[in-house]
Image (tube, grey):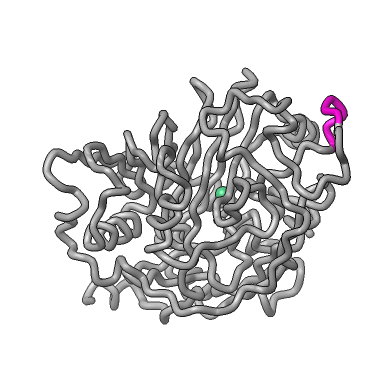
Amino acid sequence: MAPSIIESPAGEITVPIKTDPRIADSNPKARVRRVIDEEGGNTTASYPAYLPTWDYGEKYPPLEPFTHVDHGKDADTSLKDLLSEGSKIQKITPTIGSEVTGIQLSKLTSAGKDQLALLVAQRKVVAFRDQDLASLPIEEALEFGGYFGRHHIHPTSGSPEGYPEIHLVHRHNNDWGLDQFLAGKNSSVSWHSDVTYEQQPPGTTFLYILDGPEVGGDTVFVDQVEAYNRLSPALKERLHGLKAVHSGVEQAEFSLSRGGVVRREPVKNEHPLVRTHPATGEKALFVNAGFTRSIVGLKKEESDALLGFLLAHIGRGIDYQARIRWAPKTVVVWDNRITAHSAVVDWVTGERRHLARITPQAERPYETPYIAEAEQAKV
Ligand SMILES: [Fe+2]
């Protein structure tokens, strides 16, 4: 596999720091590893209940297919139950990203949640400020997120004890793993869409901050609808009908190599290269550097060349990307079907960056036929 195609084996997963020679492993046979224990039984984390744990006894069967209902589809396009009186919405860039203040996500009615799914599909990523999601009991946060689809349980990442449905991103004290990573790479940028190796990858996805550095640790999102739109009609037409292999195998191997868990056997799935969003009808490039490995039916050199072009095109498109700066109490909601993202690991202060993700799964990716631009104009 060409190294340019696998940017990172992992996306953003939280693995134990077992292999860090600076950390004494007091009980290597423990069934459950807890960061709180590794921090000496007390912690400076603002939300200790959210610190990662890994339960080596947890094993899950393969995921079963389910019928996903996309709530954005029938939402009231006025968004009046979401953007209620006193709220403010501002675009971050013309095509991708908005910022909202003056609403409380956890208090939304069903109509408001439907409109949230639609707004996020339209804007690709939306940052909501001054939210109470992190302060709610974890059950309530999960109940809120469960409205948008079946909770995904990550096969490898650390989670709060007893809540495997919560995916955690955690870096503290200049985690040794990053030093190791940067020893072999020039940049921490690692574009991916979350867990696209699943048959039904996530749709409306929530990430909320628990602790973060004063400066740094932003998350960048790329608009894969606009990335598709920028292609020539000839290339768009050629991409339609092609499928790509998305693999979770390397992520599982990465986790095992770091002393982590594999709670569910890794899977590979084939998805269309161009998928259609069920609520907006927009078409998006559906490939990402984290998990897309090859294009079905092409020879290796052809597949590497075409994927290499598409991934470079997505990664360099600063004119269709949005950079989100975290602030305390921020919840970022994105549509994982039509975006890719990367953390920006640029702070070396030792400050903790700790985020929780709620990851509702959506429909199996599907495509609709290519429409020539002259035809599209008439629609
Ligand atoms: Fe991610």
* x and y, in percent, of residue 123 in the image: 32, 52
Q: 49 or 349: nearer the eye?
A: 49
Q: Position of residue 208 (x, y in %)?
A: 45, 41
Screen quadrant of the N terminus: bottom right
Check if residue 377 falls in the magenta segment. Answer: no
Identified at 18% across, 62% down, the residue is: 77
Q: Which segment did they paint magenta?
A: 19-24
* Of the pair 37 and 68, the residue shown nearer to us: 37
Q: Position of residue 357 (x, y in %)?
A: 51, 48
Report the residue at 14% width, 55% height from top: 80
Q: Position of residue 83 (x, y in %)?
A: 19, 48
When the figure is inspected, residue 377 is found, relative to residue 347, above or below; the finding is below
| Image quarter (top left, top right, bottom left or bottom right) of the C terminus | bottom left
In depth, the one of 70 and 64 nearer the eye is 64
On screen, 307 above or below 68?
Answer: above
Q: Is residue 255 left or right of residue 349?
A: right
- Is residue 134 placed above or below 151 in the rendered structure? above
Q: Residue furthest top?
A: 349
Q: Quadrant of residue 272?
A: bottom right
Q: Evaluate whether residue 230 shows in this view.
A: no
Is residue 23 within the magenta segment?
yes
Q: Which residue sits at x=48%, y=46%?
A: 317
Which residue appears at 34% of the width and 38% of the height?
131
Q: Quadrant of residue 81?
A: bottom left
- The number of numbered badges drawn on the structure is 0
